[in-house]
């Protein structure tokens, strides 16, 4: 015998006739009445020592619905015939008992109605009128819907789901015209295969509202600047000139997530806009993270055997491993090579490497220079310091509008001596503020919140300080990064998929005309959310689920100069930055002009396969660490010792996929489908395979969830 259900050979068979009156419950009763005598007969055969037949099954001729094969409860009108949908409803009808696998659910917009067999009638007619999913009639007899193949299904009644996804979710019976009115449906309406994205994300929104951040007292130390000294730009020529000036000043600074370079950057920005800057002490706990020691690097260089200085940060700030610990000493070439980084495929580029949370020292150099190093003794000097009594620098400014509702703009100020990633975002944000501030408050429907922070840890710290207020007030937000090159504008959606922020960008992209797109033929790339990238992954984490996407030109890893010294001022020009300022300003105006009384267009959530055989395919999980990206290192989650997933990179990507969608609203099958959709969307444009966020099968995610459960990071519901 096999352990599984319907997996072994068949001993005895008794046919069961299925009629149109049968349901899942009645069919189970029929099978039990036929099957029990077969079991007794089989036992008698065994007791009497008689052979028991072994008839090999043709598994292609049957389908077994088990809990582990739970189907999506929604109707795929464009794929299924009226008979298929009718059977789909009947199979889940267990009378007064809830079906263990799925509850058939009819959706229109944000309204959902659960159905049983008594609510549905299969009409013995076909029609060429209309398209699959179209409502052909709506009145006292309910709703007539055309299905694939031309058949018609009549929905006479159902259970309207009230407060779907909330604590007090309940159902109420609706029939005939009450059903029509509840669905707000009419003849000619088109039903979608799944609920509108807003409906599907109600549970995500509910989860975020329930995840109130822990209260810990943090008293940031404020920094006071003089009032902005630069006069507003009068025209585009003026704007380009001012951008050029500040681009030149900010570019060469040795920035990091903390330290003097960060403070110098914020002080220069304060000449452009009235920043409120504050310092969070090193060692402060912010959610799952701790503010690291402040990094100060005074000088760093190597003296080669000929006495010549090489890898000097005075020549280029990328030469030093960012957050390198101090070191002085003499080494052989072989010993030195262990601390050097270069890119063989880009022999003239210096790579950008960091080590914020791992104590080591090192240098970066071009591969060409590395190949020219000769045997001998090298003297290494790294005069750096990791200050335990240091701090992290954050800045913000709020530009008031007619309401307290906010459009949020975020830029990061940590990358040294590179332009596109992401000094471009910082400059565009600063000059966007100046463009908005020139308008009278009567022309600003919403308030505007700007923050300038170090990437990742800065966004987490900012959420710690402002996150609860942002959940109440932010209606749309954008992270600005890699937005200064000559590429067409691109967008990464928020995790909400079709939030106000997402709809506004996609609408504006369709009509945008500018230097990069004078004819309007280019439409830009729009990508679905994935749980890696820039700070949108923090703002969209399950505990906040903010409507924040990411605006770029060429996304990170989609331009060859990414994270190298070739990301310089020849790649990013002042006119390109000025165009980006104008583009983001246009997006903000589009947000302000959206009619929020109308329902927003939706983007379908990737559909799960028709049937999944993995035991966890339909499993849903909630995060125990929902605020920002959890820190994996201290939990040992970066190591794959004991993991059944052999690919360590894919394992980390799988962890991030699961944690990003652990709100109880997404099955593992859906999460897997989203990962493959991202691979199809983004991977085809990716020129660096090492930066590709990998797709994971349900089987691979199933291995990972066990580790996350053992680490107390998620819980199955």
Image: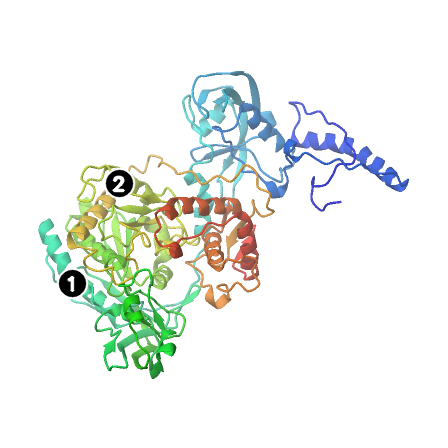
- The numbered mark, 2 or 1, whose residue comes first in the sequence reads 1
Mark 2 crowd level (few <14, some 14–19, many ≥20, 10 Å Cα): many
In-image side of 326 versus 140 (left or right): left
Name the colouring of the figure.
rainbow
* Residue 659 in sight here: yes
Look at mark 2 in the image and give the residue it sits on. 509
Q: Where is 361 relative to 57, above or below? A: below
In-image side of 318 versus 574 (left or right): right
Look at mark 1 in the image and give the residue it sits on. 248
Most distant residue in the right direction: 48
Mark 1 crowd level (few <14, some 14–19, many ≥20, 10 Å Cα): few
- Asked whether 512 or 158 is in front, the reply is 512
- Residue at position x 36%, y 68% in the image: 218
* Residue 232 in sight here: no
Q: Where is 376 relative to 590, above or below? A: below
- Residue at position x 51%, y 52% in the image: 622
- Asked whether 105 or 707 is in front, the reply is 707
Q: Where does the image place residue 93, in percent across and percent down from the top left?
A: 62, 32
- Asked whether 357 or 440 is in front, the reply is 357
């Amino acid at each position: 015998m096999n352990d599984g259900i319907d997996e072994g050979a068949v001993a005895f068979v008794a046919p069961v006739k299925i009629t149109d009156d049968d349901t899942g419950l009645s069919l189970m009763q029929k099978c039990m009445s036929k099957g029990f005598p077969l079991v007794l007969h089989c036992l008698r055969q065994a007791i009497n020592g008689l052979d028991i037949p072994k008839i090999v099954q043709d598994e292609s001729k049957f389908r077994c619905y088990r809990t582990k094969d739970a189907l999506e409860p929604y109707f795929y009108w464009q794929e299924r015939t009226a008979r298929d949908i009718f059977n789909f409803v009947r199979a889940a009808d267990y009378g007064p008992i809830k079906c263990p696998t799925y509850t058939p659910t009819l959706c229109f917009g944000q309204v959902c109605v659960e159905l049983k067999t008594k609510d549905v009638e299969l009409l013995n007619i076909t029609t060429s009128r209309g398209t699959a999913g179209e409502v052909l009639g709506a009145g006292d007899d309910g709703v007539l819907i055309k299905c694939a193949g031309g058949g018609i299904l009549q929905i006479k009644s159902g259970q309207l789901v009230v407060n779907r996804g909330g604590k007090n979710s309940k159902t109420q019976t609706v029939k005939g015209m009450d059903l029509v009115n509840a669905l707000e449906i009419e003849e000619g309406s088109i039903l979608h295969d799944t609920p509108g994205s807003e409906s599907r994300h109600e549970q995500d929104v509910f989860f975020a509202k329930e995840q109130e951040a822990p209260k810990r007292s943090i008293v940031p130390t404020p920094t006071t600047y003089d009032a902005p000294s630069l006069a507003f730009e009068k025209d585009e020529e003026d704007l380009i000139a001012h951008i050029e000036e500040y681009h030149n000043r900010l570019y060469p600074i040795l920035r990091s997530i903390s330290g003097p370079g960060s403070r110098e950057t914020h002080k220069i920005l304060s000449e452009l806009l009235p920043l409120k800057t504050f310092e969070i002490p090193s060692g402060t706990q912010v959610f799952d993270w701790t503010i690291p020691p402040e990094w100060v690097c005074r000088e760093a260089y190597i003296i080669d055997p000929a006495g010549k200085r090489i890898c000097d940060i005075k020549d280029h700030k990328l030469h030093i491993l960012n957050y390198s610990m101090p070191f002085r000493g003499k080494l052989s070439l072989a010993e030195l090579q262990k601390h050097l980084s270069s890119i063989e495929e880009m022999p003239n580029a210096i790579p950008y490497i960091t080590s914020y949370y791992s104590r080591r020292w090192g240098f970066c150099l071009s591969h060409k220079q590395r190949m020219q190093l000769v045997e001998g003794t090298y003297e290494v000097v790294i005069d750096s310091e990791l200050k335990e009594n240091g701090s992290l620098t954050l800045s913000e400014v709020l530009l008031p509008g007619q309401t307290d509702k906010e459009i949020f703009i975020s830029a990061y100020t940590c990358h040294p001596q590179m332009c596109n990633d992401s000094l471009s975002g910082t400059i565009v944000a600063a000059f966007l503020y100046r463009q908005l501030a020139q308008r009278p408050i009567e022309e600003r429907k919403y308030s505007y919140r700007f923050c300038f922070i170090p990437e990742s840890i800065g966004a987490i710290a900012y959420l710690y300080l402002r996150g609860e207020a942002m959940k109440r007030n932010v209606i749309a937000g954008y992270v600005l990064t890699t937005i200064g090159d000559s590429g067409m504008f691109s967008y990464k959606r928020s995790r909400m998929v079709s939030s106000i922020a997402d709809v506004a960008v996609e609408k504006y992209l369709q009509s945008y005309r500018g230097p990069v797109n004078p004819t309007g033929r280019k439409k830009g790339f729009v990508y679905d959310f994935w749980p890696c990238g820039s700070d949108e992954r923090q703002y969209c984490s399950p505990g906040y689920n903010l409507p924040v996407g990411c605006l770029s030109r060429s996304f990170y890893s989609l331009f060859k100069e990414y994270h190298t010294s070739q990301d310089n001022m020849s790649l990013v020009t002042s006119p390109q930055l000025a165009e980006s300022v104008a583009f983001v300003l246009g997006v903000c105006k589009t947000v302000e002009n959206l009619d929020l009384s109308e329902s927003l267009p939706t983007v379908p959530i990737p559909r799960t396969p028709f049937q999944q055989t993995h035991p966890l395919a339909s499993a849903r999980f909630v995060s125990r660490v929902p605020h920002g990206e959890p820190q994996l290192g201290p939990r040992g989650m970066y190591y794959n010792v004991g993991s059944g997933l052999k690919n360590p990179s894919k394992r980390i990507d799988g962890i991030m996929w699961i944690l990003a969608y652990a709100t109880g609203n997404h099955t593992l099958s859906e999460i897997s489908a989203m990962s493959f959709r991202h691979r199809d969307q983004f991977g085809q444009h990716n020129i660096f395979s090492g930066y590709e966020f990998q797709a994971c099968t349900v089987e691979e995610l199933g291995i990972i969830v066990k580790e996350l459960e053992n680490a107390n990071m998620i819980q199955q519901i």
